[in-house]
Amino acid sequence: MQRKRVIIMGAAGRDFHNFNVYFRDNEAYEVVGFTATQIPDIEGRKYPPELAGKLYPEGIMIYPEEELQDLIKKFAVDQVVFAYSDVPYDYVMSRSALVNSAGADFILMGAKATQLKSSKPVISVCAVRTGCGKSQTTRKVAKMLRDAGKKVVAIRHPMPYGNLNEQKVQRFAELSDLDKYKCTIEEREEYEPHIVSGTIIYAGVDYEAILREAEKEADVILWDGGNNDLPFYKTDLHITVVDPHRPGDELFYYPGEANLRAADVVVINKIDTADPEGIQAVRESIQMVNPDAVVIDAASPIFVEEYEQIKGKRVLVVEDGPTLTHGEMTYGAGVVAAEKFGAKELVDPRPYTVGTITETFEKYQEIGTLLPAMGYGDKQIKDLEETINKTDCDLVIIGTPIDLRKLVKLNKPAVRVTYELQEVGKPDLNDVLKKFM
């Protein structure tokens, strides 16, 4: 039988997972390449033979997505699998049109083909968009489970941007593990808060191998979803976070709506800072597509060290990178702090950017007068440091989930903003987890 020839479109996450669990040892298919987008410098590399399996002794090339149409013709591709997330429906269907016009099938893989079964109970925390507040929700769930006497191990959606062989299975229990695995800023933003709060967290490339290791030390597996992707594991309790600051996105982004429809529990976050109209619009969306879900109202109050420094100052606000880029948010916790505590002005960093930070603003022009904490490698971290230090401002407000001052040397004063999930009224997460346990 002739093998179907496949390309997997991805961003160093879901694409590798779909390959590992469905295509790797499947003799009915030949994966001729991955295409990559969203992540700097991932294309031009290989998915290594050590991870690709016996059918791919040379590994599998990773190409820029811009070459997709030519690749379909070059390799006589039968199917193209779309395997990344947090994208609007018109974007997905535009890619479908490109693929179909080149003669190939356009495939979106579902849970049955891609989810792995755990021997332990699994709670998933996902979202409809990047930047909804999934991370603080995950931390809150982890703490509540620990307080109930459960051994909790979190498994984070992948961010393997370095040496893929070395990142096959990563275990983070100490802050030194972040240096051991040469973590990017984005990885540190997700892993460090778990470590500090006492939760062991796994991540990497091979999510079956990761799961089997995590099961050895867990009573409950906590899936910490990323980039509004679907869980990689069959889930016993599915929690989805929605954002009333972006009402309507929960019904028009892939696969965010799938997370909303699959949810047992929906958390409407940020109700303390959202407009009533946005909150109501999100409630109506939930009622329309998932009326049986438990709905929890929540806030994400901010905590600012030395907040009195902000008043009257010209401030540079540094926000979480993916929230501004992939998530398309035009403000975050840093801006909220600047407005709340009386900053004189938000300084525009764009005249001062260098290197890869300049490129980020060229690609994501809607960011505006904020600085995304981009740091996918040493060079980009250095570019971020130089951009901050060149910017003419009185104070830096750090609105990222980690303290950037540990990674970059600043030549001006800075204050840090943190935030946690706080449920409002009933039902709350405690009610849900009591019933679950």
Image (cartoon, rainbow, N blue to C red):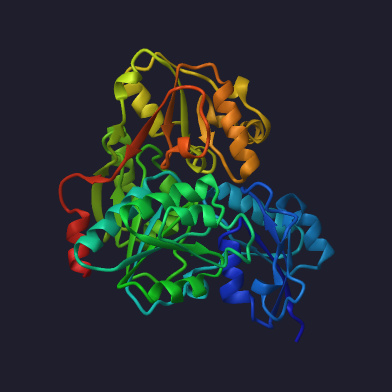
Quadrant of the frame with the N terminus: bottom right
Q: Which residue is drawn at 43% across and 70% down?
A: 233
Q: Which residue is drawn at 37% across and 49% down?
A: 193
- Picture quarter containing residue 235? bottom left
Up/down of 3 relative to 344, above or below: below
The x and y percentages for residue 249 are 44, 44
Asked whether 13 or 294 is in front, the reply is 13
The x and y percentages for residue 191 are 43, 53
Up/down of 91 relative to 214, above or below: above
Q: Is residue 223 left or right of residue 353?
A: left
Asked whether 177 or 117 is in front, the reply is 177
Q: Residue at x 67, y 73 (%)?
A: 50
Residue 252 shows in this picture: no
The x and y percentages for residue 250 are 41, 48
- Picture quarter containing residue 290? bottom left
Up/down of 382 relative to 180, above or below: above
Quadrant of the frame with the C terminus: bottom left
